[in-house]
Image (spheres, rainbow, N blue to C red):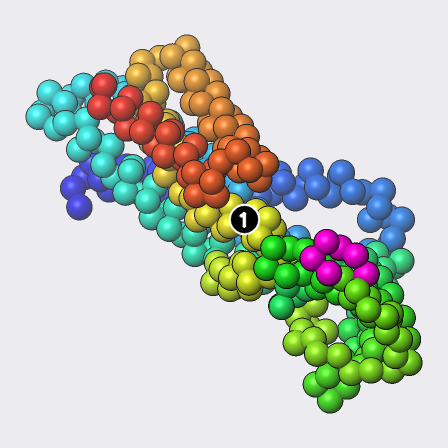
């Protein structure tokens, strides 16, 4: 590694780590003051509050790292440009790409680190964070979940008023069975369901059968108690309620595959967008770094430094705004899942590369 590369690596890492620590601290302080009245009201112990924010640091890291990369890039390359070292390096025969190559490589490495944190640490971190959040609320009833809508196997849509994990019971059950064309062919209503010996035992169950035109077919069936063929366990119901952020990419893919085998194809499509977006968003640090390079190299004095910083922040804001709009259009059905998640990142990567080539 030559002297130039060592200088750039040292400078970028120093500013990057400093910015990440500062932004994490600022994020936590702002969040504490935002919820200060609730913290005081609930009399949350300091130890629980500390654990609450410590487990959330991996998620905060993935959110603040792109902005930290932008500041580190502008500070490092801006210093070189402001002291005419860029001109000296180019006079010595180094191309623009050779000068910024180390910064781009660092952007790639940081993006890979964000991807690993997002995949290995964030899901468990967010899951623990949500559990602590429930524990901090004294009014929350543990091990009980209300108003579930589950897309089950065999084209079944289940509505459950209450799920008790402790007792392995369901209350207020309505099940709609659909054919391949998503026509309702059967409706099951039950007061209660108990998970016993690997089977669901329903109480006070009524079954309605329908023909292809939606008309009632045959007699209404009533069973005081009956074992019904449902493959899902209480834990399966709980997993379907999970936030996609608490799942790894592999778990999310498995969950999407399961939903595609049911009637929940619209939900599976939205989760596909979340899956692709998680992958592409991990490389935001690289894209924003590339966007900042051409403006950092134009810095000649204090005024140009502020203008370059302002333009870089403006482009970054536009990048995030377009990404959010693209995802929204995908979930509205206007764009395919892959295009919805990828197009903004690819467009701005091309813009950054084009601006660097123009130098």
Q: Which residues are magenta?
A: 211-216
User: Where residue 114 sits in the image (x, y, percent)?
Assistant: 44, 50
| Residue found at x 47% / y 28% | 319
| Residue found at x 73% / y 83% | 199
Number of callouts: 1
User: Where residue 206 sits in the image (x, y, percent)?
Assistant: 87, 71
Q: From the viewer's perspective, is 306 left or right of 214?
A: left
Where 61 sits versus 192, above or below? above
Magenta-colored stretch includes residue 121: no
- Residue 25: quarter of image: top right
Q: From the viewer's perspective, is 265 left or right of 345?
A: right
Where 15 sits versus 113, above or below? above
Magenta-colored stretch includes residue 214: yes
Q: Quadrant of the C terminus?
A: top left
Residue corresponding to mark 1: 269
Question: From this viewpoint, is residue 62 visible?
Answer: no
Q: Label 1: how many residues lie within 10 Å, few (<14), some (14-19) or many (20+)? A: some
Q: Which is the main secondary structure of the residues drawn in magenta?
A: loop
Q: Nearer the viewer, residue 175 or 249?
A: 175
| Residue found at x 38% / y 29% | 348
Where 188 sits versus 113, above or below? below
Where 348 sits versus 184, above or below? above
Q: Nearer the viewer, residue 81 or 263?
A: 263
């Amino acid at each position: 590694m030559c002297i130039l590369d060592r200088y750039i690596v040292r400078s970028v890492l120093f500013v990057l780590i400093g910015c990440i620590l500062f932004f994490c601290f600022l994020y936590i302080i702002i969040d504490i003051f935002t919820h200060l009245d609730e913290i005081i009201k609930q009399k949350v112990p300091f130890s629980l509050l500390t654990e609450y924010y410590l487990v959330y640091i991996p998620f905060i890291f993935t959110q603040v790292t792109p902005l930290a990369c932008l500041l580190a890039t502008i500070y490092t390359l801006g210093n070189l440009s402001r002291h005419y070292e860029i001109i000296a390096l180019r006079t010595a025969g180094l191309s623009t790409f050779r000068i910024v190559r180390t910064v781009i490589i660092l952007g790639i490495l940081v993006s890979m680190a964000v991807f690993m944190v997002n995949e290995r640490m964030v899901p468990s971190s967010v899951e623990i964070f949500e559990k602590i959040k429930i524990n901090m609320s004294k009014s929350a009833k543990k091990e009980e979940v209300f108003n579930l809508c589950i897309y089950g196997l065999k084209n079944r849509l289940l509505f459950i008023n209450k799920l008790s994990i402790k007792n392995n019971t369901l209350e207020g059950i309505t099940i709609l069975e659909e054919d391949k064309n998503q026509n309702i062919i059967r409706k099951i209503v039950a007061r209660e369901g108990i998970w016993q010996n690997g089977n669901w035992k329903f109480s006070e169950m009524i079954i309605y059968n329908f023909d292809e035109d939606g008309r009632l077919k045959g007699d209404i069936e009533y069973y005081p108690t009956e074992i019904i063929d449902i493959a899902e366990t209480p834990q399966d119901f709980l997993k379907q309620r999970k936030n996609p952020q608490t799942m790894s990419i592999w778990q999310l893919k498995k969950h999407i595959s399961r939903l595609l085998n049911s009637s929940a194809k619209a939900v599976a499509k939205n989760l596909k967008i979340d899956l692709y977006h998680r992958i592409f968003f991990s490389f935001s640090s690289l894209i924003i770094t590339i966007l900042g390079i051409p403006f950092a190299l134009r810095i000649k004095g204090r005024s140009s430094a502020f203008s370059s910083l302002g333009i870089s922040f403006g482009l970054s804001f536009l990048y995030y705004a377009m990404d959010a709009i693209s995802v929204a259009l995908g979930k509205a059905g206007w764009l395919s899942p892959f295009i919805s998640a990828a197009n903004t990142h690819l467009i701005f990567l091309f813009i950054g590369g084009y601006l660097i080539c123009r130098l």
